[in-house]
Amino acid sequence: MELRRWNVRHVRQVLEAAPHFVPFARGGDAGLEAIRAQIGPASIADLLDRARADAVAPIPALPASLYLEFARTGRREGYEDAQRARRNMLYRLTLAEWLEGQGRFVDAIENLAFARLEETNWAWPAHARMLDMPDHPTVDLAAAMTALDLAEMYYLIGDALSPSLRARLRSEIDRRTVAPFLERNDHWWLHSTPDRQVNNWTAVCVAGVVGAACYLETDPDRLANIITRGLHSLADYLETFDSQGGSSEGPDYWSYGFGNYVVLAQLLHARTGGQIDLLDDPQIREIAQFPVRTVLTQGLWASFSDSDSNPTFHPGLLTHLAERLELPALTELGMQNDFRVEVFNQFAWPLRQFAWPLPERNVAFGGTPHDWFADMAWMISRLDPGDPHSLRLAIKGGHNDEMHNQNDVGSLIVVSKGKVVLTDPGRGRYSKAYFGPERYSNIMASSRGHSVPVINGHEQAEGGQHAAAVLGHSHGEGADRLTLAMAAVYPAAAGIAALERDVVFDRGVPGGRVTLSDSFSFTTGEGAFQSVLVTPLAVEAGPETVRIGDAAGGVSVRFDPRAVSVSTERHDGVEKQYAPSVDLTRVLFTTVEPAAKGQVNLEISPL
């Protein structure tokens, strides 16, 4: 579906002809009993127990000083954690009242909902920085998610809420999100510009605001304007994906950004009687398969960019896409229904898990032998997809101005026996510095944290001009191969004239093997060159091999001691976001003597 072809008049006509809006069953609907049966009495009883505790628990405080902590210290977790606790309480209480329908949670819901309406900012401190002026609310991820949270609560149990709360909900959602979305053009995420491409923010913000309007806006002309504006914005978001449906943001942000696109797709489909169907496009089917194509082995995914190796994919999202697009592998990614809300930061996902639980499957999809995203230059190779312990490889090309960019051109990941041995460590702790000028001094975002060369002491440089060119790619029964030209990735001061990284995934040897060859030449004179491997595991260096990890998950790395010397560099307690800190070791294969040109060859085999 070409989203930009929609105009206000056409959307208005579709809205006029649409049937009654029923996105979910609710009290009195026959479908609600079917939902209860799918969930099962044990999970419902657990939800009700937790909701009873929430009903008498104090509401977490959100004082101004906690909000301003980010501006003063760069720390964002204090406010976000307290706000998340409020949200989770409200989610459990709303789901409990929706499923039980006896009114015993309404008072607690009203208390929490009024507290949410009284927050000065719905936007997170990292995005608004300061407390909003009353006439200029910040519309960010959190504000948009809050709008949809409250709108869906209103829909599910609104008849049980007081007239005062219902009026306040409608008024505040409009004042804080819908009206600013419709009337202001200063939202950076609204459209791409020559200076900045949109990213997951666009899908999340548009889904939150337009989704809330689908529930609450009663003026069809205004709603047509809101929807049309959102469709045109989402057209820019879809252009961030490559022709194979890949996203340089990685699997984590597929779940967040594209997940919210799917949330809005469902709501618009219901609101327009299927006339606006955001999933009716071949490109969407490609995008929907991104987590299927980026799985390394069961439970592990390619962790490029600010993504982690073990992302969570929402059950409701996977079920809906699998059914709508006939993609059963999406239900076989190892995700399970637990009917708990603590892992979610928006109501859309626990609601949809309860409404659309995953089928109970014991199948765990482990990928195919090979996946290739040509536009992004991501290659993923699996020795035996049916054996989760077999050797796996992921390597990327690309450039250093990608979405959630890390300076990681040429980065590779190796998994053996179901364990990440050579890592792309994913996202660092989300602090003010991490998203500011100091980003690339953080090992997680700089090339120091990735298995890429260091040239004359220089790391990779930031910017879209610092890009790799694909010299060759092939896939066959015997081997997969990717060859990148990477000299442009480094600053001029590195003095590199040519750099080719050739990576071969050899299927012909027992257990498989990865061969990494870096060929280089300098512009003038001789230079120093290092090939680097990064691991979270123990390292033991020998005369001709380096042992990384152990027999339960590890590799041996063969090298030529006449060409390179080996040393290690430890980085303990590197902070991550939403995960424990990690210890990283950089294994440095340094040319023995400065040279005008040369080659470093490493053979990586499972232990």
Image (tube, helix red, strand yellow):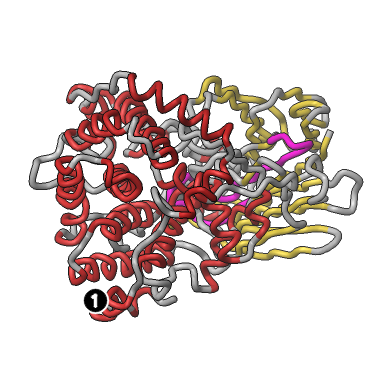
Q: Is residue 275 magenta?
A: no
Asked if residue 494 shows in the view, the reply is no
Exactly how many numbered labels are in the figure? Answer: 1
Foreground pick, 206 / 36: 36
Locate the N terminus by quadrant. Answer: bottom left
224 relative to 348, above or below: below
Q: Residue at x 81, y 43 (%)?
A: 390
Foreground pick, 465 / 143: 143
Residue span colored magenta:
394-421
Residue pointed to by mark 1: 8
Q: Position of residue 497 (x, y in %)?
A: 56, 55
Q: Secondary structure at mark 1?
A: helix
Asked if residue 156 shows in the view, the reply is yes
Q: Is residue 586 left or right of residue 19?
A: right
Q: Position of residue 384 (x, y in %)?
A: 82, 50
Q: Is residue 415 magenta?
A: yes
Q: Is residue 550 left or right of residue 423?
A: right
Q: Position of residue 383 (x, y in %)?
A: 81, 50
Q: Residue at x 56, y 25 (%)?
A: 582
194 relative to 92, above or below: below
Q: Position of residue 322 (x, y in %)?
A: 60, 59
Q: Residue at x 76, y 42 (%)?
A: 602
Locate the C terminus by quadrant. Answer: top right
Mark 1 residue type: Val
230 relative to 383, above or below: below
Q: Is residue 508 left or right of residue 125?
A: right
Foreground pick, 535 / 202: 202
Foreground pick, 577 / 333: 333
Label 1 crowding class (10 Å Cα cut-off): few <14, some 14-19, many 20+?
some
**In this view, which residue lies farthest toward the right?**
510
